[in-house]
Image (cartoon, rainbow, N blue to C red):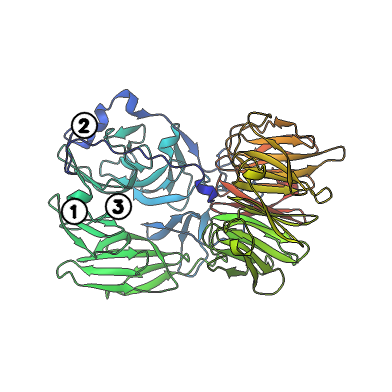
Amino acid sequence: MRKARMAAAVLVPGVLLGTAGVIALRVHESLKAITAEVRDEDTISFDTVSLCGPGGAYAKENGSGFVPVAAGGAYTTGAVLDGRVYLAGPDGLAFFSGADEEPKRLRPGMDLPAAPITRLAVARLRGQTERSLVAATSGAGMLLIPAGFGCGVQVLPRDAAARDVTTVLPLRSGDLLLGTQSAGLLVYDGRSLKRFLPAVKDAITALAGDDADLWVGTQDAGVLHWRGGQVTRFRGDSGLPDARVNDIAVGRDAVFAATPLGVAEFADGQLVATLGKGVFARTIAVAGGHLIAATVDQGVREIALDGRLEHVALERTDLQVTGLFRAAEDVFATGDDGSVLRRTQEHAWERVIAPGGGALADREVTSLEFGPDGRLWIGYFDRGADVLDLRSGRAEHVEDDHVFCVNRIVRDPQRMTIDVATANGLVLLDAAGARPRVRQVLLKRDGLISDQVTDVAFSRSGAVVATPAGLTFLTPDGAQSLYAFQGLVNNHVYSLATDAQTGRVVAGTLGGISVVEDGTVRASLTLKNSGLKRNWVTAVVKVQEPDAESWFVGTYGGGVMQMESAGHVSAMDTGVPNTVINPNAMLVTAEHVYAGTLSDGMLVYSRTMRQWSRVTAGLPSRNVTAFAEREGELYVGTDNGLVHVAERNLR
């Protein structure tokens, strides 16, 4: 399961007035009039947070102790300010003085809020004399940062729904128009934050135009056009290639909307054509009579708008273009390797910024484990796994039809293999050797109760495999399975913990906890018969104390519980009692117990003080998905990269 998406997104559909997909909403004559006359309930309270100095929430000198691991540039948007190229994305914000020089960076969780930047723009705000950078973030509102990374501020709405900003459009008035994932359109004038067109409640993906002629792209409800006091909506039944709009660009005589099935062309407020039919257009730009479209799987395509001639302008199998942005007459492309290309007057592309040099294949970490040789194995949601040599910084990547969606990585102490639980089997790889080599793949045909494997653990009799269909025990006598018909509290097992001496297995499931001994369910604990606060158990670890043993149980929405060896369950005071613990995101060390949450950072239990604390500073995301520890160094995986810290320095 993808830990970053355990909580289902709820999208509010747009308000539909009229029929046939073209809908008119009567509004005021100008943006100024609308923002001046909104109702009090459409005003959103917000806080401004300093982004610099010792009193700031995110000091320039990182005091958390965390250090990024093998981090390169992961940029999806950019802008040019005072002749410098600024790039932004999941890896934060950076600017470059030269093509091959190391950039100056602001990292999420260290110098910036722990949230990816979704869109970057340049604006001269109302009442300001100098232009500054405006960064929309996914979950942390909006950032206003001066050129050269002077002291900036975070505009943080108190309404959580308004913090997820997907795009930003600077207006000639000095105001900023913001698109959000679940709060519609907002407008910021430097003093207040208000809803713009409150009847529009769609998830916003793109903004283009100006105060008098505004174009809005949505996630699943097409294109909205605001002009002269009217909003017109274009959807699939209006001729739009697809209801999902990825980007919008304004040309001299037309407006273009990028969709997964081509680019829609609008002229005089009417949908007139579809360009590049069937092309999955991720982002677009218009320059010199040409439409430039970065696609998901067909490189960068260029269409001459006068003759409609189309050709592939940039086709490199080793590079995915993640974003396009303009500066004056120049068009820049950001690559998934951290590089930046510029379109020349001859319509070729030249590299202006070198690749970022990050060793890791992805940022969305799902599992961590150290091999016997000290290399760190890193599992990803949909990019297989990396084997990282921490001394050299080099990583070997393994990815195939089975090692793809990784749920868990565990070292087998007997067979000296690295066992990878995936959505398509249990994969056993050699722990030694310069390159990871698959030794065996176990599937349903080999005795597993399901091809999908969520966890694996080891008891005195062999391996225990967790699946959505029950448990499978791999012993010298063969494979034996256990499921609800035989007493398991629920077939969908998320997490396992074992006692090597007694052979006891504690299984965390969608319906509670089952304690298994010698292949038989000895006890099952649920909301009804125990102190368990949630039936959905996502993580279990054994904690051995000198005077007793217990099991710490992570739940979806009930925080961490403690189960004594006798089976008594009680809640633990973590400070965030209703938090979601991510699947298998728990680790026990000599000094601490760690738990990773979906949105509240990492929880840290001191085994000497017997109390919990919460850590968010220094993390690139508050969605903490995995832990590993070696020689006192703690490695923390998130949905936005990997960091490490010495346990003794953890604050």
Residue 50 locus on image (x, y percent): 50, 39
609 left or right, relative to 601: right
> Which is nearer the N-term, disc 3 or disc 2?
2
Q: Which mark is residue 67?
A: none
Residue 605 to residue 332: above or below: above
Residue at 21%, 31% in the rendered image: 33
Q: Which of the two marks, 3 or 2, is nearer to us in this view?
A: 3
- Say whether residue 181 is left or right of residue 172: right
Instruction: Check disc 3 and report its element: helix, strand or loop.
Output: loop
Are the two marked residues, 2 and 1, in contact with CB atoms closer than 8 angstroms?
Answer: no
Report x, y in % for residue 411.
72, 60
The front one of 205 and 329 is 205
Question: Residue 555: x percent and y percent?
Answer: 62, 38
Question: Of all residues shown, which one is farthest toward the front?
Answer: 485
The amino acid at mark 2 is: Ala
**Badge 2 or badge 1: first in the primary sequence:** 2
**Label annotation for residue 245:** 3
Q: Residue at x 31, y 39 (%)?
A: 13
2 or 1: mark nearer the eye: 1
Would you name the residue on which mark 2 appears?
A: 33
Is there any visible trace of residue 419 in the rendered image? yes
Frontmost of labels 3 and 1 is 1
Q: What residue is shown with label 1?
A: 239
